[in-house]
Amino acid sequence: MANLNLGKQWGLRRMATPAGHFTMVALDQRPPIANLIGKKRGIAPADVAFADMIDVKRVLVDVLGPHASAMLFDPNFAFPAGLEKLPAHTGLVVTLEDHRFKDTAGGRVSHSINDWSVEKIKRAGGDGVKVLAWYRPDAEPDIIAHQQQYVEKIGAECRTFDIPLVLELLVYPFPKSERHTTDYVESPEKMPELVLDSVREFAKPKYGVDLFKLESPLPGAGLPAHGDGDAASKAQAYFDDMGAICKDAGIPWVMLSAGVTPSQFVRVMQYAYAAGANGFLAGRAIWWEALQHFPDLAAFEAQLRAEGSATLKELSALTARAGTGWKADYSGFVAMQAEGELCASYV
C-alpha cells in the first residue's frame, strides 16, 4: 500500500481554511525589515537590535494572526516574538533557509540556517517547512546542481518526518547585470520563461514539493487590469502555463507578493486565481506600508489594524470567491479491509 503521508496532509489542512484555501501571511522577512529599521535608526542593518526585530514581529502576529489561515515564521526572530501570540487555529509554517545566500558571478547558492533543520521544525510544532531557493535555469551548471541537490535533500527529509515542503522560487539578477540588487524584490531582468522553467523543474516528483510559493511570471507592478484587452490576455497565458504545470504535477500553489503594493497584489491574484491558484502567502503587500511608522510602534499597530487587516480581508474574500480549494487526499483508506493495515502500511 502506498504511503498515506498523513503528516503532510494534516499539515496542509492546518495551513488552509476549512474550504481549502491558503490565506497566509509571511513574517519571516529578515533583510527587508532590518534594512528599514537600520535606516530609521541611522545604523547599519547588521547593527539592528534584536529587540527591535522582536517588537516588529510581535505586532505583526498580534494584529494579523487571527485573520490568517497560517503564518510563516523564521526561527531566530518570529518564534521568540510571536509563538505565544499565534492563535491556536492559525497554522505555523517555518523557514529553513538562511537569508545570507552566497552571491557569485554564476548564480546564487542557498543554505539552511545554522543549527536548524527539518527535524527541529517538526519537533517545534511546525505544520510545514518553507524553503526559498534562488533559481535561474540559465545559471552556471554547478550552481544549478547545488540548488537542485539542496531542495532534493530537504524534500527527502520532509518525507522522512512527514511534514509538508513549501518551496518558494525566485528569479534574481546576476552580479554582472547593470540593475543587480540583492534586495528581496522582483528581479528587474525577470523573464516569464525563467519563472516557468523553474517551476517546471521543481514540479518533478524527486523534489517532494507539497506546496509551491511562486512569483508572478511577469512583474506584478506592471500587470494590466485583469481582463482588459490583448495585453491582459497575453499576461493571463503565462499564469495559465504556470497553473497547468502545477495541476499536471498535482501540486497546489500560492502566490508571493514580492514587495508590490496592496492594489498591485490584488491584481496579481486575479490573474493567479483565473489560472487555478489555491491562495497566497504574502507579507509586505499586507504590512509594509504600516511599518513605515517605525519606531512609533503604536502608529505602526494602528495603521496595521486599519489598513493591513483590511488588505488581508480583501485578499481572503477574493480567495474565497475565485480561488481553487485544495482537498486532502485520504483515498488510501478506501482499500483497507482489516484491522492493523494502517499501522503496517504507514512507513
Image (cartoon, grey):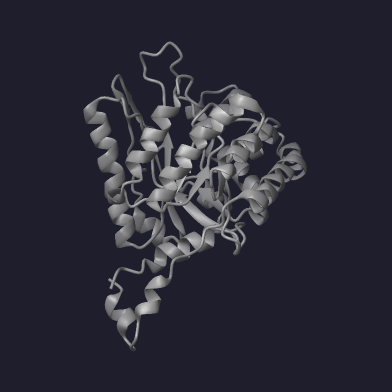
Quick check: 8 left or right of 280? left
- Quarter of the figure that contains the N terminus: bottom left
Corner quadrant of residue 299: top right
Q: Please state which of residues 101 and 233 is positioned toward the viewer in this rendering.
A: 233
Measuring from the top left, give residue 160's x and y in whole percent: 29, 61
Measuring from the top left, give residue 210's x and y in whole percent: 41, 53
Write the residue at 67% across / 29% down. 228
Quick check: 53 left or right of 59? left
Write the residue at 66% across / 46% down. 59
Corner quadrant of residue 191: top left
Q: Please state which of residues 156 and 232 is positioned toward the viewer in this rendering.
A: 232
- Quarter of the figure that contains the C terminus: bottom left
Q: Please state which of residues 17 and 319 is positioned toward the viewer in this rendering.
A: 319
Q: Which residue appears farthest toward the bottom when viewing the image?
A: 339
Quick check: 49 left or right of 297? left
Measuring from the top left, give residue 323's x and y in whole percent: 60, 50
Measuring from the top left, give residue 168's x and y in whole percent: 43, 41
Q: Which residue appears farthest toward the front when viewing the image?
A: 230
Residue 84 in the image: above or below residue 6: above
Q: Is residue 170 visible?
A: yes
Write the residue at 58% across / 44% down. 273
Q: Which residue appears farthest toward the top when viewing the image?
A: 178
Write the residue at 34% across / 43% down. 202
Corner quadrant of residue 144: top left
Q: Is residue 216 visible?
A: no
